Amino acid sequence: MQQKPIPGHDALVPPDADIARRYLAAADAVVERRGRAVDRRALAGLQIANAVITAGYLVAFALILRQSDVHASQVILFTFLVWGQLASGMAQRNGMQWRWSASRWPLILGEVVVLVGAVVVFGLVALDPGLPVGVVLIPAGIVLVGIGGYGVLQLFRAAGDARSPRPPRVTLPAPIRWGTLLVGVALGVLTMLAGAPDDVLRSVISLLVMLVLLAWIVAFNTPVGLPAIGASWRWPHVAAFLLAAGIPVALVLGGGGGSASGLAGVVGGVVVIVLFVLVSFVPGREGRG
């Protein structure tokens, strides 16, 4: 080991072979602890999933805006905000830490550029009905290539990492279970309102539900906040959420007006609530140590 002495001080005595081996063992232990705390494969997979979900959201949002359905667009927007909070909990569960550092600035800047470009194209597509419907795929493609591509790159980089032990499955704690149920009730009510024939009534009730969701999003750092709920979810809970998020989109894009769409909205909302009641009893994930 070579070192440069500090001016005015003698160089430290190099460690002997035994001490050097201990240093190397300590370095290996640090790498092992990082591997247990940070699951780079899971983070890369979540990055790809977020890219796919964001792309799907942009397509659905653009199609709904082209139909001039303001209420349905608000439902989709709040659903996406709720997913963002849930996904942040999943990221923290797998070891992601939200720290600003010089090494992260290029990545953050690149993602901002990709998102801004996608939003600009999205605005042109959504607000100009004269453009062909197929162009709604352009902003989605930008997100998939820019953000999803980086996730694929991260997945390749993590290929050599040791497999992290899977946390044991545990029964959802009571606060997380009730939080999961509340997510389902909120999405179910919004789904029912998507087919309500009375525009004034559905706007008022939707506003109340969205204000509750907004307050819940603001309280993200609490034991029953959405990140804490997302951190405890496994794939059945995520699948239920994505299915519930797709039901109002399908009702708006594929349904007509009048009592038929109202009935479809009620049935869809009941399906969403029942689905979340069922998955609230599915075991979740224990926090990683």
Image (cartoon, rainbow, N blue to C red):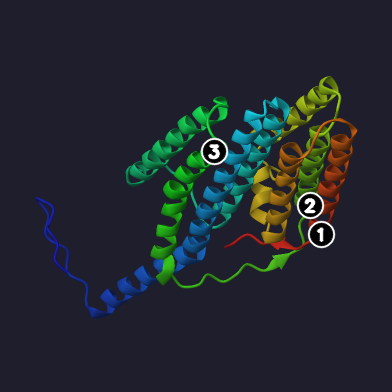
Find disc 1 in the rendering and name its residue.
281
| Residue positioned 13% across, 53% down in the render | 6
Q: Residue at x 59, y 53 (%)?
A: 90
Give the quadrant of residue 196: top right
Name the foreground residue: 51 vs 95: 51
Q: Residue at x 14, y 66 (%)?
A: 2
Q: Which residue is mark 3?
A: 136
Q: Position of residue 103 (x, y in %)?
A: 33, 47
Q: Does residue 233 appear to the left or right of 94 in the view shown?
A: right
Within-10-Å neighbours for mark 2: few <14, some 14–19, many 20+: many
Q: Is residue 243 above or below residue 61?
A: below
Name which residue type carries label 3: Val
- Numbered label tally: 3
Outermost residue, bottom side:
18
Amino acid at the residue labelled 1: Phe
Q: Which of the two marks, 2 or 3, is nearer to us in this view?
A: 3
Q: Secondary structure at mark 3?
A: helix
Q: Give whichever of 139, 16 is nearer the camera.
A: 139
**Residue placed at 83% from the left, 57% from the top?**
278
Residue 283 spot, x, y in % from top left: 75, 63
Residue found at the far top of this picture:
200
In the image, farthest residue toward the left: 8
Percent across and percent down for residue 273 are 84, 47
The CA distance from mark 2 to mark 3 is 37 Å
- Residue 105 at x, y percent in the picture: 35, 41
Q: Which of pointers 2 and 3 lies earlier in the amino acid sequence?
A: 3
